[in-house]
Every structure is written in C-alpha cells, then in structure tokens.
Image (tube, coloured by chain):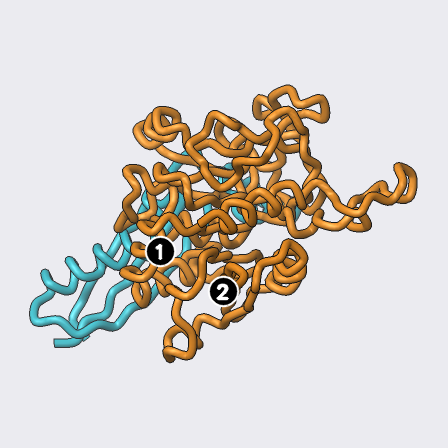
Chain colours: A orange, B cyan
Amino acid sequence: MGRKKACILRVGGTNCDLETKVALDDLGLETEIIHMNHLLRGHRRLNDYSLLVIPGGFSYGDYVRAGAIWGKKMLSKFKKEIEEFIEEDKAVVGICNGFQVLVESGVLPGIDGSISEYPRATLATNSSAKYECRWIHLKYHQASSCRLLPDLDEDTVLRIPIGHGEGNFIVGEEVLEEIKREGLVVFTYCKPDGSPANGEYPYNPNGSMLDIAGICNSRGNVMGMMPHPERAYFGWQMPDWTSRGLQPYGDGSLVLKAIASYVERL
Amino acid sequence: MRFRARVEVKLRPGFFDPEGETVKEALNDLGYRVENVRVSKVYTVDIDATTIDEARLLLDEMCRRLLANPTKDLYEVEVQPL
C-alpha cells in the first residue's frame, strides 16, 4: 500500500501552502499543492486524497470577508465531493484563512455533521483592532469530539504562532450551546502555565468567545484553527531555540503529527 | 427586466468597528466633534429578473449566502428598474 495522500489546496492569495507541504512531507505523507482550478478542470480528484488542508493566506484578497469568497466558490463547485470526503471520515484541516474558509462556507461548526447553507459563526475583527502576529499559548481539549488528534497530550501547553486580523470567533447563543453540547471546542488560548485566558488580552489575542482558537465538526474529522502549527514545526522555527537549545521539532509538529497519524490509520 | 440594487452591509450594533473608530479619531483631530462613526460596505448589483419582487428575493438570498455574515452583519437592499 502506498503512502497516504494529502491535498493542500490553494487559490490566489494563499501563502502558507509550501511550509505546510514541507511539514506533511516530513511526516511521511505524499503531499501535493493543488490549485483549485486543477480540481475544476479535472486534472486532480479530491477523492484520491485522505487529507485536505486549506492553508493560511489572504485568499481572493480577503474580499467581502476573510475566507468568504473561497468558502462559497469551493462549496458551489465541490459541495458533493466535500460532503463525500467528510462522510468517508477523511480529514479536513483549515489553518488560519483556511479556518475562516471553513466557517464562511458553512462546513464548520458542522453541527450534526452537515454543511449549513449560511455561515453559522464568524471570525470577526480582533478585539485589539490589530493584526496580531506573534506567539501564543494553546491548550488542547481531549474531551472534544475531534478525532484528528488522538495522540496529542492535553497537558502540554503548545506554543504556536498566530498571524491574523480576523480571528475573533463569535456565534449566537443557540450555536454556542450546540458547540458546547457537541464538544466542538478543540483548542483554546491559554496563559503560559496552561490556565484559561478567560478572555484576557494578550493571552486571548483576539477576543474569541470561550478563548476558542480551534473547533471541529460534530463528526470530529473537520478541524479549523487560527494558530499556524506549520510555522512551529521544526525546532529552528521556535522563537527561543538559541537559548533553550535546538530541538529537532517544535510544538506545531505535535499537532501535525497527530493529524498525520489519524490519516495513516484510515 | 434589468434592475439595479444598492446593497448596504453593516456590522450589527455592538460589534467592534476599528475602521469606524479610526475615522472618528481622525475627524476629531481635524477639529470636528464626532461622537460615533460606523463604516458600511455598499455593493451596486445589476441583475436580470422578471419582476422587482423576484429581484428583491434574489438579492436577499445573495446577502444571506455571501455578502453578509448573519452572525455579525445587517443588510439593507434597495432595488429599482434600470
């Protein structure tokens, strides 16, 4: 049996595709960066892959709202393929702009596993009114419904960078209750000691409800997160490797390794 | 028939509008006593439809599907024949 295949999808404005590929290649996946037009023209088929990554960037210039155009284009062209991909328990991961795309397209929060016609959440302008580009601390919630991170330890406080102006996760009360009930909160921003940020800036960098940094769908195989694990994959990408000593891998590798491990088991 | 729609999309009250805040500060720096500024986005959409009511329905759908995010945006649509 060959290696599992990962599709890193890109459009104009995507800019985190290459570092994502370098990381996933290193994890042993057969990774391709595919422009969406190649899927449209039938040069590639989504069905041939086990992992779909929607990487970070500024797709379509963030016109209308960050992720809105790509989200709707993707759904208008490939809704059936994406639904099948999800129903087959393959993995879908959206990072930063990719998370915005999954929210704007209605794939996330994906309550009851379905794709909603209209977005049910928003990643609004950061409450700091700044483009937040720095390292944050992140806590993984093992009790969540997410099945993509079986090997990730809940007690590890992850240091992973963010780079976004619109990461303030907001939902209405009804959707918030559904998110809590279904256990869809995968990552939250936290303090360096792992205690909750409780909305406190700068630990919560954008004002997100419940300090949410990443969520999954009810089925547990679609996940979106604002922080960039691919920017903290190798030890030399960590901000303090010169003082702490160079380790082969950084904290982001724990997240991507867990995802790759899920994909390998498919 | 062809219709022209003016679609205004704005943040719901209570949603932080840093662009509006920045414009307010600049206007105050210019000597105006401005209390509040909120920034909206306006789309001008030309569309073919059989009746003005159909055009309004289509525009409403466009707003809910793409132009506005119902969690944070409000929208207003005005349609007139071209």
Q: Residue at x 35, y 24 (%)?
A: A181
Query: Which sits in the foreground, B56 or A158?
Result: A158
| Image location (x, y in percent) of residue B11 | 40, 44
Q: Residue at x 70, y 49 (%)?
A: A233
| Image location (x, y in percent) of residue A79 | 30, 60
Instruction: Tell me the element at label 2.
Output: strand
- Which kind of residue does numbered mark 1 sit on? Phe
Q: Chain of mark 1?
A: A
Q: Residue at x 41, y 57 (%)?
A: A68
Q: Is residue A63 above or below residue A144?
A: below
Q: Can you see residue B37? A: no
- Which kind of residue does numbered mark 2 sit on? Leu
Q: Can you identify the residue that label 2 sits on?
A: A9
Tag of residue A85: 1
Give the side of residue A156 with respect to residue A219, left or right. right
Q: Residue at x 42, y 44 (%)?
A: A221
